[in-house]
Amino acid sequence: MNFYVLTLFPDMVSDGLSSSIIGRARENGSILVEAVNIRDFTEDKHKKTDDYPYGGGAGLLMQAQPVFDAHQYIAGKIGSERPVRTVYLTPQGRTFNQQMAEEMAKEENLIFLCGHYEGIDERALEEVVTDYVSLGDFVLTGGELPAMVMIDTIARLVPGVLHNDASASEESFSGYLLEYPQYTRPEVWREKKVPEVLLTGDHKKIREWRKQMAEDRTRERRPDLFARYEKLLNCHEKLRKDKLHHAGMLELIARGQAELLFDGEEGILLQDKKSGVFMLTVKDREAGERILDEVFGKEDIPASIPVQKDMFVVHQEYMVPIVVKRFDLKLWSGCYILSYTRKESLPKKDADIRRLDMSYLGAVTSHYKVADENEIAERLSGGNIFGIFVAGRLAGFIGEHTDGSMGMLEVFPEYQRQGLAAALVTDLANRTLQKGYMPFGYVKEDNTASLCLQEKMGFYRAKEKVWWLVR
C-alpha cells in the first residue's frame, strides 16, 4: 500500500514513520510512505506558499496553486484512472476511528493533505479532497501528526505489516471490545502474580478468560462500545436458532467483523467490515423490502457502507430478484453452507502442507478462476492460502476468504483421487479451530464432489441454500 503526504515539513513525517513496526514495513516493502514538500511546487521565487486571506482575519492561508500542483504531481505519478482518495486533516472532518481505518486499508493509494496556519484556500480543497477527517475536537498546529496517526493505524491492517496475522483482529475496537489485559515475565512482580489461568496451557480456558476480561473492561471503560457489543450478542442469539443456515453471519460476529445495520423481529442485516459483503436474512418478502428501504433509503447512511453495493448474501430465495433489481446485481450462485461444529480437531492427515507466499501467485491464478489476481494476491500476502506438495511440487491449495470462510479448494488434475483435497480441508479446519473459530464454507449447489467430501469428513450441511449476488 502506498501513502503520500503533502506537507510543508516532509522531514517531520519521514522521521516520525521510520521506526518500529511501520519503519520495518517500509524497509521490507509492505508499505511505501512518501512525504512531498508543497514548497517545491510554488511559483514564488522565495518559496512562499501562504498569503493573507481575502476579507481580512487573523493569520495566513496556504495558497491554492502549490497545493494543487503538488497533488497533480502525485496523482500523475500514481497514474490511476479514477481520482485518488485524498484525505484533508481538519477539525471540521469526520472523526477518525477503526472502522474508517479498515475501509481505507482497502485502497492501493492514499494521499494525505496537511494544512497549516489558518488552513488552505477553499478552491484547492474543492479540486482535490475526497475525505475530510479529524482526530477529535481539538486544534493542532498542522496536519502532520494526524496524518502519521492515520497511517500508523491503517498500515497495521495491511497484509505483511504485522508478523502475527491474528494481531490486528484481536486488538482493541476490532469487535466493539477493548483488548484483554496481558502479562509477561516475571511471573511475580511487586507481589502481583500473573493470573493462574494463563499458566495452565489450556487454550480453551485462556480464550474464555480473555473474552470475559475484555467484556468487563469494555463495560467499565467504554459503556458506549459495550452497548453496541450487546446488540451484536442479541443478534447472535437470534441467528443461533438456525445456526447452520446462518453460519456465515454468526462467524462474522464471532470474529469481530460484523457491522450491525438492522436487527429486529423482521430480520437482520449485517455487513462484513473487511470485505464489504452484506448479509441479509428476513421473515418475509415485505419485511425484507422494509429493511432495505430503512437502511439504504436514509440520507445518513453509515460511512462504512460503500457507495456501490457490490456483493450480497441473501438467505431467502424470494429476496434474490428484489436485491438484484434494487442494486443492479446478478445472481452468481446458490450455495450450501457447510460447518464443522465440533470442538475437537479433525484427525491429521500425513501431508506436506505449507503456507504459500507471493511467489505462487501465478500458480494459484492459473488454476483458480473464481477470484481475480488482486484478490488472490491479497490472500497470499496475508498468509491465507495453503498449498499441498507431492515430491516437492505444488499439487493443490486451499484458502481462507476475507469473511473467514474456507474455500479456493483446488487439486491439480494429475494429483486428484489421492486424498489431497481431504488433507487440505483438514489442515485449514484445524488451523481455524486453533484460533477459536468455527470452520465453515460456501459450496456451490452443483459442486457435488466438494459437498460429499465435506459431509463425509463431519461437516454439517444447512438444509436451506443462500444466494450470492454480485455486480
Image (tube, rainbow, N blue to C red):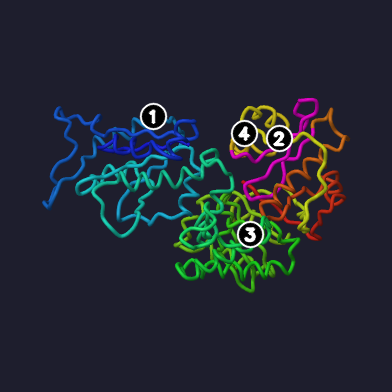
* Three-letter amino acid code of the residue under disc 2: Arg
Q: Nearer the viewer, mark 3 or mark 1?
A: 3
The residues bearing labels 3 and 2 have C-alpha atoms spaced at a distance of 27 Å
Amino acid type shown at disc 4: Glu
Question: As displayed, is residue 127 above or below residue 277?
Answer: above
Residue in view at x 44 percent, y 39 percent: 22
Checking the image for residue 76, the label placed there is 1
**Overall secondary structure of the magenta section:** strand
Mark 2 highlights which residue?
354
Quarter of the image for residue 380 reads top right
Pick whichever of labels 3 and 2 is earlier in the sequence: 3
**Place of residue 376 in the rendered image (x, y in percent of width and height, measured from the top left):** 63, 36
With 350 as the anchor, is 431 left or right in this view? Answer: left
Residue 454 in the image, given as x and y percentages of width and height: 82, 49
Q: At numbered mark 2, what does the secondary structure look like: helix, strand or loop?
A: strand
**Mark 2 surroundings within 10 Å by alpha-carbon count, few (fewer than 14), some (14 through 19), many (20 or more):** some
Q: Nearer the viewer, residue 59 or 161?
A: 161
Q: Is residue 286 left or right of residue 64?
A: right
| Image vertical order of residue 45 relative to residue 378, above or below | above
Of label 3 and label 1, which has the lower sequence position? 1
